[in-house]
Amino acid sequence: MTEIDGRKFLYAEGEISFTFFTYNYEISKNSLSLYDVGLLVGGRDAVTSTEAFRTEISASMKKPECLSERLDFRMQ
């Protein structure tokens, strides 16, 4: 997990090799919202290091279509 440009992100590798997931998340008092993050400038191939990941996310966030597929979870 990391914070980039004031937003929180999770970057995780899936069970299948070379499958990665990037999510922006927001936590409020009773809920968790996840957004799928598109790597829209250089794509996954541009992510060669932690710093390259941060640069790619920052650049992609400037595009309105970067965040998609919002998932909301409510805590009981």
Image (cartoon, rainbow, N blue to C red):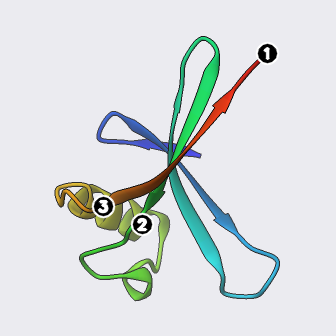
- Image spot of residue 34 (x, y percent): 54, 44
Q: Which residue position holds label 1?
A: 76
Instruction: Give neighbour class at mark 1: few <14, some 14-19, many 20+ (Cα, 10 Å).
Output: few
- Image spot of residue 18 (x, y percent): 66, 87
The vertical placement of 76 against 12, above or below, is above
Q: Mark 3 belongs to which amino acid?
A: Cys
Label 1: state its secondary structure. Answer: loop
Which residue is at a point 61% across and 23% down the rendered structure image? 31
Residue 2 shown left or right of residue 4 in the figure: right
Tell me which corner region of the image, top left, top right, bottom left or bottom right, holds residue 61.
bottom left
Which residue is at a point 60% across and 11% down the rendered structure image? 29
Q: Which residue position holds label 3?
A: 66
CA gap between label 3 and label 2 equals 14 Å
Residue 72 shown left or right of residue 17 in the figure: left
CA gap between label 1 and label 2 equals 34 Å
Q: Mark 1 belongs to which amino acid?
A: Gln
Q: Quadrant of the C terminus?
A: top right
